Amino acid sequence: MTLMMRAHVPLSLCLLALVSCGGDGSRSPAAADPSATYEADVAPDGRPVPLGCDGAVPKTSVDTPAGLLVPPGARVIVASANPRIDDNRITVVEGYVELAPTNLVAGMRRIDGATISFVEDEEIEAEVLIGDARSKNFWKVVRTCEVASRFTALVVSAEDSAAVGGAVQSQTKRGRR
């Protein structure tokens, strides 16, 4: 056997092993249990889920509320958006953002016309109080995988922000002290 042939034998064996496993490249094993469920490769927005983030992406989504301030270009999947029980002027939004907390904070700083009133960035979680002429938001994000986070945001219109400012401010760590 020549030196060149010896170099190709391990590669050929690896390829043979991969091909003989069967399947079409999907995540489901070739001899899958039909009663088992598997994480979807595609999120509700129709785009692929980043590796390791399957558990972070909501299974269903709703429309993004008009007042939710989102960093330019950020992928956000809103799982729910409901009026707060004790004050329906505040919308509680929960979902997935394809940014780690530190990157979300940096992205929030790039929103045109928005002012950040409070930031606490601890790398694995962050809190941001941000507002513009339309609305005020309080975001709480927690990193769930390498490139993404789950979030809860409180959204209130700019005209109601003074009336409910205490409720939003009380959510920040500074307000809870």
Image: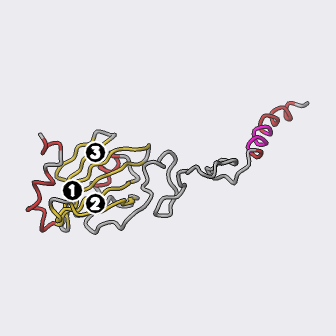
Give the amino acid type for the residue marked by disc 3 in the picture: Ala
From mark 3 to mark 1, how far is it between C-alphas? Answer: 13 Å
Disc 2, disc 1: CB below 8 Å?
yes
**Mark on residue 111?**
2
Give the mark, 2 or 1, whose residue is nearer the N terminus. 2
Which residue is identified by label 3? 126
- Residue that lies at the very extreme toward the right in this rendered image: 1
3 vs 2, front mark = 3
Q: Secondary structure at mark 2?
A: loop
Q: Quadrant of the N terminus?
A: top right
Residue 14 magenta-highlighted: yes
**Mark on residue 130?**
1
Q: Tally the marks.
A: 3
Residue 67 spot, x, y in % from top left: 25, 66
Instruction: Tell me which residue sits at (34%, 40%) in the image.
Output: 124
**Left or right of 146 in this view: 38:** right
Residue 50 spot, x, y in % from top left: 50, 50
Q: Secondary structure at mark 3?
A: strand
The image quarter in which residue 83 lies: bottom left
Principal secondary structure, stretch drawn in magenta: helix
- Comparing 43 with 137, the one in front is 43
Disc 3, disc 1: CB below 8 Å?
no
- Comparing 122 with 156, the one in front is 156
Instruction: Tell me which residue sits at (33%, 61%) in the image.
Output: 80
Give the amino acid type for the residue marked by disc 1 in the picture: Ile
From mark 2 to mark 1, how far is it between C-alphas? Answer: 10 Å
Instruction: Tell me which residue sits at (73%, 44%) in the image.
Output: 21
What is the basis of the colouring in this image?
secondary structure
Give the amino acid type for the residue marked by disc 2 in the picture: Ile
Which residues are the magenta region?
Answer: 12-18
